[in-house]
Image (cartoon, helix red, strand yellow):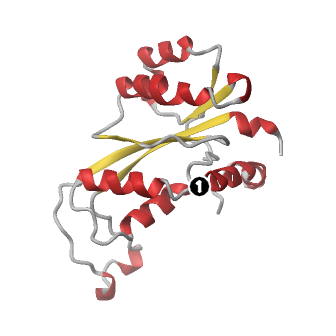
């Protein structure tokens, strides 16, 4: 395995709703066996941000509402930059999505502040998602949803997600990092189109 993957800090954010959404296929929409009693909840949700690397996984950050430039500046200074100290020679590459908020002047200033120790790897919009952090998201949600009793508030959901995040081991993260060449090959064979990975 090339050591390059060991120097990347992979980051992502995802919104989790308090109550699960349907998940039905269009064919199942009118099948009585697929109907579920719903609870009106106003789509209460929490945005979870997390970063992982070959060397560590930081505790997730729960954000209420959408992620802001101020949140990004805080995350870079208080979560991402401290991760760099775990890397040999304090040298790391920070991968982030193509969220427009990351182009904010304050966020770019923070990147400039850390440019000696932290390169950033921008992710092109509409590109195949090879971020190794993607596969754990459904696992995390499934583990949180399997908890009984289910969370009944956004705060409880945050707590359960934090608890379940610890069940994703560093060995799992390292296996995901090692899968990058395979995933890249599949994307290349599909000419950048959809893949099953």
Label 1 sits on a secondary structure element that is loop
Position of residue 107 measured from the top left corner of the image (x, y, whole percent): 45, 19
Instruction: Please give left or right for residue 38 compared with residue 77 in the image.
Output: left
Position of residue 161 measured from the top left corner of the image (x, y, whole percent): 39, 54
Q: Residue at x 38, y 71 (%)?
A: 146
**Quadrant position of residue 156:** bottom left
Which residue is tagged 1?
169
Q: Residue at x 42, y 15 (%)?
A: 106
Instruction: Please give left or right for residue 13 compared with residue 39 in the image.
Output: right
Position of residue 49 measured from the top left corner of the image (x, y, whole percent): 44, 41
| 13 vs 147: above or below | above
Instruction: Specify few, some or many for label 1: CA neighbours under 10 Å numbering under 14, 14-19, or 20 or more.
Output: few
Position of residue 139 measured from the top left corner of the image (x, y, whole percent): 50, 62
Instruction: Please give left or right for residue 190 compared with residue 78 in the image.
Output: right
Q: Residue at x 42, y 22 (%)?
A: 73
Q: How many marks?
A: 1
């Amino acid at each position: 395995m090339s050591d390059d993957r060991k120097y990347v800090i992979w980051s992502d954010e995802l919104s989790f709703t308090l109550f699960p959404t349907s998940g039905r296929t269009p064919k199942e929409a009118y099948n009585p066996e697929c109907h579920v009693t719903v609870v009106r909840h106003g789509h209460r949700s929490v945005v979870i941000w997390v970063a992982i690397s070959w060397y560590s996984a930081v505790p997730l950050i729960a954000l209420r509402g959408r992620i802001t430039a101020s949140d990004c500046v805080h995350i870079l200074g208080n979560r991402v930059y401290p991760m760099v100290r775990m890397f040999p020679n304090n040298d790391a590459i920070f991968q982030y999505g193509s969220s427009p908020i990351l182009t904010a002047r304050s966020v770019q200033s923070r990147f400039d502040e850390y440019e000696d120790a932290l390169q950033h790897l921008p992710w092109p919009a509409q590109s195949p998602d090879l971020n190794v952090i993607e596969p754990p998201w459904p696992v995390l949600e499934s583990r949180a949803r399997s908890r009984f009793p289910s969370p009944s508030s956004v705060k409880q959901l945050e707590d359960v997600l934090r608890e379940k995040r610890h069940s994703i081991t560093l060995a799992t993260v390292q296996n995901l990092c090692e899968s990058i060449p395979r995933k890249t090959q599949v994307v290349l064979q599909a000419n950048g189109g959809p893949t099953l990975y």
